[in-house]
């Protein structure tokens, strides 16, 4: 049986709570291809720079079907962080939810 990682104590103002660290595991029959490996590396570096408050915003651009969701999934797996995904309509929100969930 897998051992759980130790909890981290979070102090959010008035209350303290323990949360388990994230452990994302990307499961996909595909590997990053084309420009994706470079984009993932640049995004990861941007997230690491943000920890030093030297880089605050990043934008991933691409046409429909270019693999933006897969690129972000790789970014989340490599940085082991949460992400807020905002969509402009319910159809796209449902599609993104099913892609990230599976």
Image: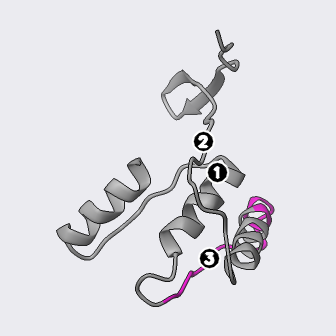
Picture quarter with the N terminus: top right
Front-most of residues 82 and 95: 95
**Residue situated furthest top in the rendering:** 1
Q: Is residue 21 left or right of residue 85?
A: right
- Tell me the SS state at disc 1: helix
Distance in Å between CA atoms under marks 1 and 3: 19 Å
Front-most of residues 11 and 31: 31
Q: Which residue is mark 2?
A: 24
- Which residue is at a point 74% across and 71% down the rendered structure image? 46
- Tell me the SS state at disc 3: loop
- Which residue is at a point 40% across and 86% down the rendered structure image? 64
Q: Which residues are magenta?
A: 48-62
**Residue situated furthest left in the rendering:** 90
Front-most of residues 78 and 52: 78
Is residue 12 shown above or below 4?
below
Front: mark 2 or 3: 2
Is residue 42 shown above or below 99?
below
Measured as percent of width and height from the top left, residue 49 is found at 79, 67
Of the image marks 2 and 3, the number of the one nearer the N terminus: 2
Q: Which residue is mark 3?
A: 57
Mark 1 crowd level (few <14, some 14–19, many ≥20, 10 Å Cα): some
Is residue 19 shown above or below 80?
above
Q: Which residue is mark 1?
A: 77
Give me the disc on residue 29: none
Of the image marks 1 and 3, the number of the one nearer the N terminus: 3
Magenta residues, dominant SS class? loop
- Which residue is at a point 76% across and 59% down the rendered structure image? 51
**Residue 81 falls inside the magenta stretch:** no
């Amino acid at each position: 049986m897998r051992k759980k990682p130790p909890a981290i104590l979070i102090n959010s103002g008035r209350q303290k709570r323990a949360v388990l660290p994230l452990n994302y595991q990307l499961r996909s029959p595909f590997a990053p291809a084309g420009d994706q490996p470079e984009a993932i590396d640049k995004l990861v570096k941007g997230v690491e720079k943000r920890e030093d408050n030297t880089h605050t915003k990043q934008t991933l651009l691409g046409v429909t079907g270019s693999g933006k969701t897969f690129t972000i999934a790789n970014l989340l797996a490599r940085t082991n962080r949460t992400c807020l995904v905002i969509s402009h309509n319910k159809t796209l929100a449902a599609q993104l939810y099913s892609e990230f969930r599976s």
